[in-house]
Image (cartoon, rainbow, N blue to C red):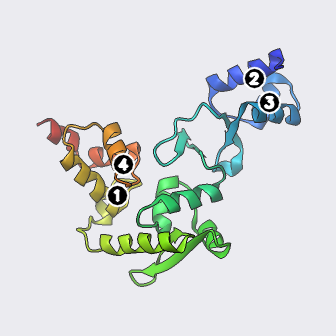
Amino acid sequence: MATERHQKLVKWMKKRQVATMKAMRHQFQLSHMTVFRILKEYGYYTSYNFNATYYTLQDVPQFDPLGLWAYRDIRFSRYGTLNETIAAVVEKATAGMTVREVEDRLQTKAANLLCRLVHDGQLRQRPFRGRQLVYLAADAKQADQQYQQRQQSLQQPTVPHRDLPQGCSPSEVIEILRQMVLSPQADPDQLARELTGRDVQATIRQVRRVIDHYALEKKRRR
């Protein structure tokens, strides 16, 4: 049965949303093991950046379609650690992902970890466009499908990198713009859901950035 201090910690965390172990221990004068036991009993996530320093309760995050959630610059994933998150995000990408695409999506450095995941057999990599690499799922059949999709995307119209919204790759911008044409009255949330339904991993934030970047909201209203 939870003690009063345990209940207070949970209530405090729900209101605060995110906190460090040090902050929780100081606030309630509890030991590291006691705080950890409370969190484990309730369910929690640790941040995949900032060296997993930050904690949040399991029912606090509102994960996007890709399983990611951010509190200010602190980032969480339903998959757990940064390694697990990178592997999951790459596996879900219909055309695999480059280093830049992974880092733009997760907003953290990933190059060294991608190499390690390939070395450990958790991901695959293949060259494309000369010396550039694309990272793919560990499953050989899925990796082939992703690579074929990547090759096909090279034949699609391109968007200059200098004109891209922050955190969006050319292929993501093209898919978002295409969905906006198909659903001209849809709001960003609906567009993101429709893209997910087509197995295109674009977040609500990315949809909004494309709309803002190209001033499309004013044009749509007209």
Q: Are marks 3 and 2 in contact (CB under 8 Å)?
A: yes
**Real-space CA distance between mark 3 and mark 4, rounded to the nearest whole angstrom:** 37 Å
User: What residue do we see at 15% from left, 35% from top?
Assistant: 221
Q: Residue furthest left?
A: 222
For residue 197, the mark is 4
Mark 4 neighbour class, 10 Å CA radius: few under 14, some 14 to 19, many 20 or more: few
Q: Are marks 1 and 2 in contact (CB under 8 Å)?
A: no
Mark 1 neighbour class, 10 Å CA radius: few under 14, some 14 to 19, many 20 or more: many
* Quadrant that contains the C terminus: top left
Would residue 43 appear left or right of 194 to someone viewing this image? right
Q: Where does label 1 land, which residue? A: 172
At which x and y percent is residue 180?
23, 47
The mark nearer the N terminus, 3 or 2, is 2
**Real-space CA distance between mark 1 and mark 2, rounded to the nearest whole angstrom:** 41 Å
Mark 2 neighbour class, 10 Å CA radius: few under 14, some 14 to 19, many 20 or more: many
The mark nearer the N terminus, 1 or 2, is 2
